[in-house]
């Protein structure tokens, strides 16, 4: 969440900043609830003070005396008033928090203007985009694709969007995960293995709630959500903690399966591996101080680019415009690989700085130079997501004999140079 003190003092600046983003919220209602909340809190505190004073006065009186009995009546009235005011505080606090949580993060000044994905800026490109491999076809048209990535049996076991990876394809996925994790380790990220379910407090802290309820799988019996990304549990690792400033930046990586409902998704752009309900991903997460977070964002982006370069996949980096960045994001880069078979760009990573938005919700702080707690900044990036990386590998490396050349960086792990269905 944003700083309520900043909103109180700079409502017009907040309105101007939020005009860049696609999310709507009612700042006037938030401010009205905030004023009412503060008034009710003051009234409740005054009533408690009166209650304490009456308690002290009553303690000085002889029990059973007319004065004592009169004070008892007064105390009952004061206690009832305190109880009523505390109930009013809880009610207005709930209304305030519900409204306050609808305010997205403020975009950084370097975020370009724009309303849709067409307004995103190409920040950089890498690799050969012009030379189309002679045998490139969409990955779902490779003759053996359905044998090594079995969607039909996945439907039987779970439903659409939950494929089985079989044989060499399962090993290739495992090789990619190993590469992603080892690349992160070499870049200074400590590996963690987090839960793949989270509670509502964790999802609220990272901004999935109340923004993305419809995209998450939910178990109402336990009140738990299957994670859409490891960002959610890993960011909450330090929830409600104060970190030593000298420990920052803290960098973590995590491999998990991820689950997204992707309700309403259909069409050729989501065929094959382009969009799944369950997929594997390595996530990179950072906690930083307020001064260095945007420098750390650039380092994060470079770390992810290094993996794509190691795989020899052509890619581009997009600087996302205000109308296309996410609810909790202050600045966001998207990395897209070029899949020659489809002749289109496929997003494989988002690298984002959330400034203090998530950390304020999660209560993650560090000690400033004066020893006082300061809200930390959080960042994350996909390093990387498997399905579309795999799609680009299959399409860009398809050979004349129908096999796919394994990227050189994976050949030692795989113990082979090509894969394909041979039975």
Image (cartoon, grey):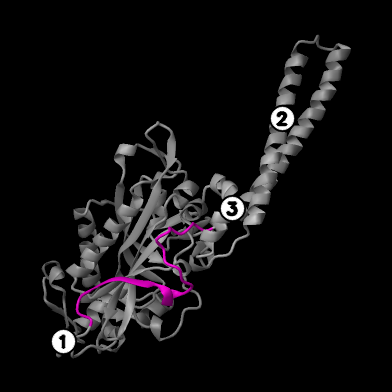
Helix, strand or loop: magenta stretch: loop
First in sequence: mark 2 vs mark 3: 3
Q: For the point 46% across and 74% down, which residue is it?
A: 116
Left/right of residue 363 with respect to residue 412 in the rendered view: right
Mark 1 to mark 3 CA distance (whole Å): 59 Å
Q: For the point 24% across and 59% down, which residue is it?
A: 181
Mark 2 lies on residue: 46
Label 1: how many residues lie within 10 Å, few (<14), some (14-19) or many (20+)?
some
* Image quarter hosting the C terminus: bottom left
Give residue 394's position: percent from left, percent from top: 23, 80
Residue 29 lies, with reference to residue 124, above or below; the image says above
Give whichever of 390, 221 is nearer the camera. Answer: 390
Give whichever of 337, 181 is nearer the camera. Answer: 337
* Residue 366 is a magenta residue: no
Disc number lying in front (2 or 3): 3
Mark 2 to mark 3 CA distance (whole Å): 29 Å
Disc number lying in front (1 or 2): 2
Mark 1 to mark 2 CA distance (whole Å): 79 Å
Whether label 1 touches label 2, CB < 8 Å: no
First in sequence: mark 1 vs mark 2: 2
Residue 261 lies, with reference to residue 206, above or below; the image says below
Label 2: how many residues lie within 10 Å, few (<14), some (14-19) or many (20+)?
few
Q: For the point 81% across and 9% down, which residue is it?
A: 62
Q: Secondary structure at mark 1?
A: loop
* Labelled disc at residue 399: 1
Whether label 1 touches label 3, CB < 8 Å: no
Would residue 90 be seen by someone viewing this image from the given angle? no
Provide the residue span drawn in magenta.
Answer: 104-129
Mark 3 lies on residue: 11
């Amino acid at each position: 969440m944003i700083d309520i003190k900043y909103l109180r003092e700079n409502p017009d600046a907040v309105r101007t900043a939020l005009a860049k983003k696609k999310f709507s919220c009612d700042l006037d209602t938030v401010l009205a609830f905030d004023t009412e909340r503060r008034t009710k809190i003051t009234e409740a505190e005054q009533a408690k003070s009166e209650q304490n004073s009456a308690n002290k006065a009553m303690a000085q009186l002889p029990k059973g005396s007319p004065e004592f009995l009169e004070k008892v009546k007064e105390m009952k009235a004061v206690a009832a008033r305190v109880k009523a005011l505390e109930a009013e505080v809880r009610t207005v606090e709930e209304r305030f928090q519900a409204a306050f949580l609808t305010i997205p993060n403020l975009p950084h000044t370097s975020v370009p203007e724009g309303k849709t994905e067409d307004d995103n800026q190409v920040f950089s490109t890498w690799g050969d985009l012009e030379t189309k491999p002679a045998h490139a076809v969409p990955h779902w048209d490779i003759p053996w694709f359905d044998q090594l990535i079995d969607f039909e049996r996945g439907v039987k076991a779970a439903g659409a969007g939950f494929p089985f990876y079989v044989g060499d394809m399962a090993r290739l996925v495992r090789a990619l995960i190993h590469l992603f994790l080892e690349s992160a380790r070499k870049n200074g990220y400590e590996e963690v293995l987090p839960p793949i379910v989270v509670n509502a407090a964790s999802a609220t802290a990272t901004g999935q709630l109340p923004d993305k309820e419809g995209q998450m799988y939910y178990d109402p019996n336990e009140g738990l959500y299957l994670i859409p990304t490891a960002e959610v549990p890993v960011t909450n690792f330090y929830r409600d903690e104060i970190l030593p400033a000298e420990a920052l930046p803290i960098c973590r990586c995590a491999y998990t399966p991820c689950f997204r409902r992707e309700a309403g998704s259909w069409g050729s752009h989501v065929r094959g591996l382009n969009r799944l309900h369950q997929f594997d991903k390595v996530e990179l997460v950072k906690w930083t101080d307020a001064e260095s977070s945007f420098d750390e964002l650039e380092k994060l982006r470079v770390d992810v680019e290094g993996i794509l370069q190691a795989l020899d996949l052509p890619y581009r980096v997009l600087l996302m415009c205000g109308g296309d960045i996410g609810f909790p994001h202050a600045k966001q880069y998207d990395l897209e690989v070029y899949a020659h078979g489809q002749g289109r760009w496929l997003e494989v990573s988002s690298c984002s700085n959330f400034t203090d938005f998530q950390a304020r919700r999660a209560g993650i702080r560090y000690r400033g130079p004066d020893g006082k707690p300061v809200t930390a900044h959080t960042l994350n990036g996909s390093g990387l997501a498997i399905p579309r990386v795999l799609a680009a590998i299959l399409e860009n490396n398809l050979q004349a004999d129908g096999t796919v050349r394994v990227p050189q960086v994976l050949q030692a792990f795989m113990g082979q140079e090509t894969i394909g269905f041979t039975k």
